[in-house]
Amino acid sequence: MFVNARGPTSTDEDWQFSVRTCVQLTPIQSSFMARLQGKLALITGGTSRIGLETARRFFQEGARVAITGLSKASLEAARKELGDLIVIEDDA
């Protein structure tokens, strides 16, 4: 079952309509690029999972990004993966 604005449905036609509508209404790449230009973001836990992906997205949108992490190895891996980051080793 799929739930959309019209309520619960179970037909493939309604599901495909809802998916197409969502894709058309959220052009993420075109509307958000560079909206953080000139900003500085501090992301704690920025060496893995959600923190790393947040750092990546902020960096793509133009922010200067600083991340914290527990180990030098993970901080250097994040810097190598994402580019010009400020890294801060944290002791928890």
Image: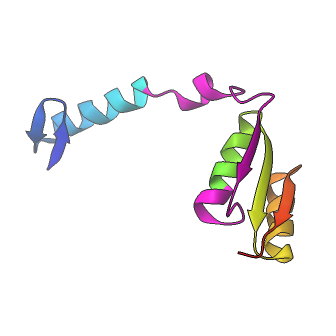
Q: Quadrant of residue 74?
A: bottom right
Picture layout, residue 31 above or below residue 73: above
- On screen, residue 70 versus residue 88, left or right, reads left
Q: Is residue 2 placed above or below 5 in the rendered structure?
A: below
Instruction: Please state the horizontal and vertical placement of residue 17, each as a whole percent of the image.
Output: 25, 30
For the image shown, how many numbered marks are present on the structure?
A: 0
In which quarter of the view is residue 19 placed? top left
Look at the picture and state if 17 lies above or below 54: above
Q: Residue at x 86, y 74 (%)?
A: 72
In x, y percent, where is residue 92?
A: 70, 75
The residue under the point 26% across, 33% down is: 18
The x and y percentages for residue 54 are 64, 50
Q: Determine whether, in the image, residue 24 is placed left or right of residue 29.
A: left
Q: Nearer the viewer, residue 17 or 3?
A: 3
37 magenta-colored: yes
Q: Residue at x 21, y 39 (%)?
A: 15
Q: Residue 45 in magenta?
A: yes
**Residue 23 locus on image (x, y percent):** 41, 31
Q: Quadrant of residue 33?
A: top right
Seen in the image, is 3 located left or right of residue 82?
A: left
- What color scheme is it? rainbow
Q: Which residues are magenta?
A: 26-52
The relative height of residue 88 versus residue 91 in the rendered view (above or below) is above
